[in-house]
Image (cartoon, helix red, strand yellow):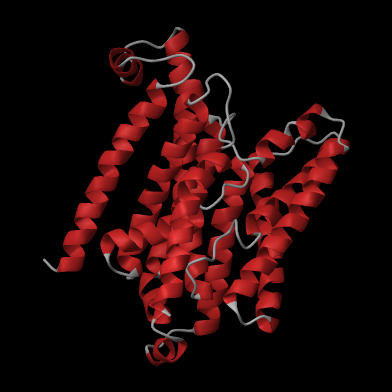
Amino acid sequence: MGENMKRFFVTMMGLVALLVLLVAWNIGSGSVSVTAAQMCEVLFRKTTEGTFYHIVWDIRMPRMLAALFLGGALAVSGFLLQTFFQNPIAGPYVLGISSGAKMVVAVVMIVCLGKGIQMSSFAMVLAAFFGSLLAMGFVLLLSMRVHKMSLLVVCGIMIGYICSAITDFLVTFASDSNIVNLHNWSMGSFSGTDWTDVLLFTVIICITVVAVFLLAKPIGAYQMGEAYARNMGVNIRLLRVLLILLSSLLSGCVTAFAGPISFVGIAVPHLIKQAMKTAKPLYLIPGCFLGGAVVTLFCDGIARSLFAPTEISISSVTAVFLVPVVIVMMVKRQDAR
């Protein structure tokens, strides 16, 4: 067994172990504590009624699965964007893609509710996907004129601010209670997730991540340079389109169900790359998914339980833990030049 394979298995086993512990913590902790015995009794269906059953199955399990799948999707989306722009500080939140998705969802929701139409979860995903593509389109247009990645990131942040300002303006003057609740969603939260949502985003994310994994070999060739990829028979234009579509779908899905979540898409691929000591997509794609799930579950657990019953924005927690990682990464990158 090669060194890369050993590191891959050790890292994955470590992530799985952390994931199991975090799942137990997220189910058991909160304003109402659930003991290990009560958790086992509820999870193995020895009881199907009572307060603990409804807390675990109707509130905490859907939320835990949302943090797990959406966090993993966000990390994979970040990896795809970093591959596309060939820069480690690219990510859906920094480039304004999440903010674009948030803006379009807000606009569509206001229009639909104004006409008495209740938006379905699938409609929110479509709106968020369109918003992600819209923001991505602006970033790509700017990338044709701005060749320095640092300036492109600044432009992406400005796009994000514009989209957030438009969203805040719409929410401020909204009168419908459902639209007013959009403010909490726009700050980033997994609360309110139900089993219908879980089924929808699980199907979308699983299909998309499998599609990304099947592209591991062309992505690996693309990382070696366009000339090398062409010599290996990779259709560069098609691969770029697929990278944009898949990353936009993943980040849009996250935004539709949880709002914008900061820095997971930037920091997690870097951490996984450091842990595995390789840049091979075959290893990094499953690693990023598990790593994103672990980090998001940990941050959501803190956001939910630190000041329980008051809940803080998950983006505030991810910023506290992941911004130092991004800063260190940027400093190391600068020193390496």
**Among the 4 quarters of the image, the one containing residue 218:** bottom left
Q: Nearer the viewer, residue 27 or 197?
A: 27
**Among the 4 quarters of the image, the one containing residue 294:** top left
How many numbered marks are there? Answer: 0
In which quadrant will I find the C terminus? Answer: bottom left
Q: Is residue 76 visible?
A: no
Q: Answer above or below: position of 117 versus 4.
A: above
Q: Nearer the viewer, residue 321 or 33?
A: 321
How far across and down, in percent of the image, does residue 153 sit?
Answer: 62, 68
Q: Residue at x 20, y 55 (%)?
A: 9
**Left or right of 127 in this view: 193:** left
Q: Residue at x 67, y 52 (%)?
A: 128
How far across and down, in percent of the image, does residue 123 sit?
Answer: 69, 46
In which quadrant will I find the N terminus? Answer: bottom left
Q: Answer above or below: position of 279 versus 131.
A: below
How far across and down, in percent of the image, does residue 160 sit?
Answer: 70, 57
Q: Residue at x 36, y 27 (%)?
A: 25
Q: Answer above or below: position of 47 versus 127.
A: above
Q: Is residue 141 visible?
A: yes
Q: Residue furthest top?
A: 50
